[in-house]
Image (cartoon, rainbow, N blue to C red):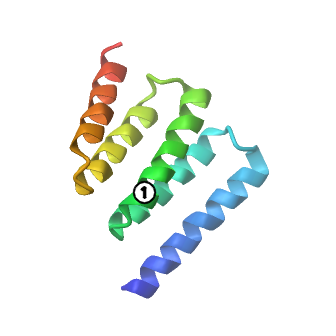
Amino acid sequence: RRRETQRVLDSVMSELNDNLQRYGPRHPLVGLSHNSLGLVHMYTENYEDAILEFEKSITVNNKALGLKHPDVYATLMFKGLAQLALERYDEAIVSMLRVRRCREN
């Protein structure tokens, strides 16, 4: 299982690097790659790295797509779940409230 997980992680990293070279750092596909990498880290219970990747995805997609885009608030939700897994309850609440504000506005 560990070998297969590493293979997935390597594949997502390769996709991220390809997207960075092809589109530059502010393209939605780069944001999607960061989100995918965050999800792989969540799967492996590497929550700190997951949060970092989700934050990168949020930054890229907020600039590229706007805060109200579903990709942005979906990633905010994933970030909140990673914070919850780390028992960072106050941070998780902030992330979840940001999701609600994005969807309401």
In front of the other: 99 or 29: 99
Q: Position of residue 24 (x, y in %)?
A: 75, 44
* Residue 12 percent across, percent down from the top left: 56, 64
Quarter of the image for residue 23 reads top right
Q: Say whether residue 73 is left or right of residue 19.
A: left
Tell me the crowding category of disc 1: few under 14, some 14 to 19, or many 20 or more residues within 10 angstroms, Cα based. Answer: many
Tell me residue 51's x, y (percent).
42, 51
The correct choice, above or below, for 57 with respect to 17 in the image is above
* On-image quarter of the N terminus: bottom left
* Looking at the image, residue 82 lies above or below residue 77: below
Image-based side of 104 in relation to 48, left or right: left
Dividing the picture into quarters, in which one does residue 18 lie? bottom right
Q: Total of numbered circles in the picture?
A: 1
Residue at 40% across / 42% down in the picture?
75
Q: Quadrant of the C terminus?
A: top left
Q: Is residue 5 above or below residue 32?
A: below
Task: Give the SS element for disc 1.
Answer: helix
Q: Where residue 97 sits: x, y (%)?
A: 27, 27
Q: Amino acid at mark 1?
A: Ala
Q: Could you tell me which residue is drawn at 45 percent across and 87 percent down?
A: 3
Residue labelled with disc 1: 50
Hey, which residue is sitting farthest top in the picture? 105
- Residue at figure coordinates x 59%, y 37% from the top left: 60
Quarter of the view holding residue 65: top right
Residue drawn where x is 36% and y is 60% of the image: 47
